[in-house]
Image (cartoon, rainbow, N blue to C red):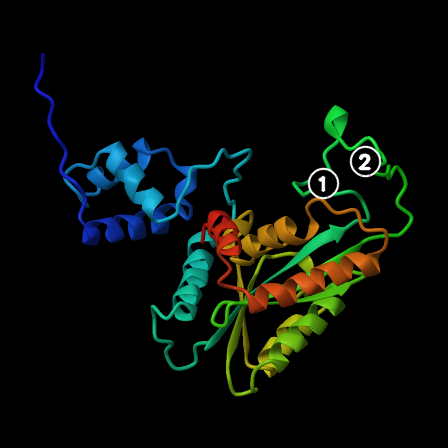
Amino acid sequence: MAERVRVREIDDDEGQRLLRIIRRCTGSVVTWSLAKPADFLVAEGVVDDVSHEGLRVLLREEGVSFQRIKTWKTSPDPDYATKKARVEHLYAIADGEVIPEQGEPDVVFCLDEFGPLNLQPHPGRQWAERGGRHKDPDREPRPRRRATYTRPHGVRHLFAAYDLGKDKLYGHIKSKKNRTRFLEFCRYLRSLHPPEIRIAIVFDDFSPHLTTKKDTRVGDWTTANNVELAYTPTNSSWLNRIEAQFTALRYFALDGTDHASHKEQGSMIRRYILWRNRHNTHEPLRQVVDRANVA
């Protein structure tokens, strides 16, 4: 029987270096199995050897969990590397890891639209009276979810932005999702800081976000208002940090609800944003965000 070789443990400095390399090369550790990053790190000469269990313990301590992936799209964007590098550099500025150079932004927002917001029952866990044979015989039966075969009330869209430096969420609910509404929300974000402070906004390449030959309003506004627009690569919405905030919004504000009107639903979302900004260190909130955040 061959003698079993014991692989040495990873020290703290090596562990942090491994995490930085894995995140930089993959964008998301959760998309890899344990064998792939271990083989990659050895092949690149980062370490002589690393056990799968040692890597598993390291990732678990850093709050990285393995998740089953339903679909994964490879970005066909020819400028994928350039766009991804710019977005990650802006994140480094916001996190205080890099000092911004002359002309670089001091404030970084992540922006996206959440929706469409329908008036329909949303599944989710919640506290409810127990049903079945063990319920109180004097209590009325638990109400069933209403059917929504027709939805005559239309939809709404939440324009939301996440300030990375202040760890604050901003949101406006609009009836339409077009370039005019998008610029209205951008003007609001611009008003949060003095004009001399340069800001950057990270978002995807959804058509209302773009400057076209027929409509140059977005480009004209950014040039006139000291704003940089950083687009995430195509099919790379995971790179936008606001996606994790949307996961928390859905979890805390919408799961298990059945709002009768858009006013009621909008009030719930606005109250959640106010609560979230006052309790951004709330442990359950941080757990949901950290589990969903991959950038």
Left or right? Give the position of 206 relative to 76.
right
Of the residues shown, which amino acid type is indicated by label 2? Answer: Arg
**Does residue 220 appear anywhere in the picture?**
no
Q: Is residue 102 left or right of residue 146?
A: left
Where on the picture, by quarter, is residue 160? bottom right
Residue 221, by quadrant, is bottom right
Of residue 139 and residue 113, the one placed in the foreground of this image is: 139
Q: Which residue is mark 1?
A: 128
Find the residue positioned furthest to the top.
Answer: 1
- For the residue pair 150 and 24, the one nearer the viewer reads as 150
Q: Is residue 143 left or right of residue 96?
A: right
Where is residue 51 shown, x and y percent of the image? 22, 33
Q: Tags 1 and 2 in contact by the CB under 8 Å rule?
A: yes
For residue 69, above or below residue 260: above
Q: Residues within 10 Å of mark 2 (few under 14, many from 20)?
A: few
Return the disc, 1 or 2, that comes first in the chain's sequence. Answer: 1
Between the residue at mark 1 and the residue at mark 2, the CA separation in whole angstroms equals 9 Å
Residue 216 appears at what percent x and percent y? 68, 71
Helix, strand or loop at label 1? It is loop
The quadrant of the rendering that contains the N terminus is: top left
Residue carrying label 2: 142
